[in-house]
Image (tube, rainbow, N blue to C red):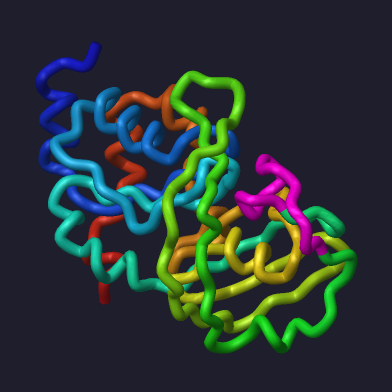
């Protein structure tokens, strides 16, 4: 158990903690676990990530939460894979098959630049501690304008860069495919290559974690 001196280290620490989230763990679990394990006063984030996805989650520690709007506004980069010939009610491979599947990519230019997208009404979620996904009706979503700077495919694998508004699952669904895997590589100037794997983070001592938190002054220049 951490002593009062160790707890005090993190109480006085403010900044950004990039974490590499594994696929299959609810995003909220990352935040709750880090806050509880290290007795942090406040833990926010610079952009959520779906349960099925892996990759970069930028945690905002203590006073760094006042910069949440700046981090949330950052562009993001992703890699992932799709399932050709399968379209589901959730937009990913965990949903129920529906009509309208596409077997090939027709014209990627249609999905670049400003695109209007609607998030699928149904979502495949995984409750904390559960080993399986369940399909939940999240209601009718409004159309959202997103901007896709680039998207490239090599077979069923893709790489893309887009603004903060893009829901990748909705983009892939609009193509007539299902999202099979997703990994966030970058958020603004943060790169998953520099992030701490979540499993490793849980093995670290408080002092080690404090040394991994990036001060705001080093990021917001």
Q: In the visual, does 2 lie left or right of 169?
A: left
Q: Is residue 4 above or below residue 214?
A: above
User: Residue at coordinates 51% horizontally, 68% vertically from top-left?
Assistant: 118
Comparing 12 with 143, the one in front is 143
What is the x, y in percent for residue 41? 14, 36
Comparing 183 with 64, the one in front is 183
Q: In the visual, does 80 lie left or right of 161?
A: right
What is the x, y in percent for residue 185? 57, 59
Q: Inspect the magenta stretch and tell me whether residue 89 lies in it.
A: yes
Q: Is residue 112 above or below residue 159?
A: below
- Figure quadrant of residue 65: bottom left
Q: In the visual, does 115 lie left or right of 213?
A: right
Q: Total marks drawn? A: 0
- Figure quadrant of residue 220: bottom left
User: Residue at coordinates 88% horizontally, 70% vertically from top-left?
Assistant: 104
Comparing 146 with 158, the one in front is 146
| Residue 81 visible in image | no
| Residue 4 visible in image | yes
User: Residue at coordinates 27% horizontally, 70% vertically from top-left?
Assistant: 70
Q: Is residue 8 above or below residue 92?
A: above
What is the x, y in percent for residue 1? 24, 11
Q: Inspect the magenta stretch and tell me whether residue 126 lies in it.
A: no
Per the picture, the main secondary structure of the magenta-coloured stretch is loop
Q: In the visual, does 81 lie left or right of 168?
A: right
Q: Read off the magenta span.
A: 88-101
User: Residue at coordinates 24% horizontally, 42% vertically from top-left?
Assistant: 43
Task: Give the farthest residue toward the top.
Answer: 1
């Amino acid at each position: 158990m951490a002593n009062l001196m160790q707890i005090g280290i993190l109480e006085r620490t403010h900044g950004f903690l990039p974490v590499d989230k594994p696929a299959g763990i609810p995003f909220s679990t990352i935040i709750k676990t880090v806050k509880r394990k290290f007795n942090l006063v406040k833990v926010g984030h610079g952009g959520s990530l779906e349960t099925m996805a892996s990759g970069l989650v930028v945690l905002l520690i203590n006073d760094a939460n006042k910069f949440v709007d700046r981090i949330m506004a950052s562009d993001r980069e992703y890699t992932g894979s799709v399932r050709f010939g399968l379209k589901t009610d959730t937009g990913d491979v965990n949903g129920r098959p529906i009509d309208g599947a596409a077997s090939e990519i027709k014209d990627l230019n249609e999905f670049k630049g400003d695109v209007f997208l609607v998030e699928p009404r149904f979502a495949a979620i995984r409750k904390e501690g559960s080993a399986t996904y369940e399909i939940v009706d999240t209601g009718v979503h409004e159309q959202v304008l997103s901007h896709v700077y680039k998207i490239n495919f090599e077979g069923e694998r893709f790489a893309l860069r887009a603004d903060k508004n893009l829901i990748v699952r909705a983009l892939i669904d609009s193509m007539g495919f299902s999202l099979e895997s997703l990994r966030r590589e970058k958020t603004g100037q943060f790169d998953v290559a520099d992030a701490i794997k979540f499993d490793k983070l849980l093995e670290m001592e408080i002092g080690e974690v404090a040394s991994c938190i990036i001060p705001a002054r080093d990021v917001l220049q």
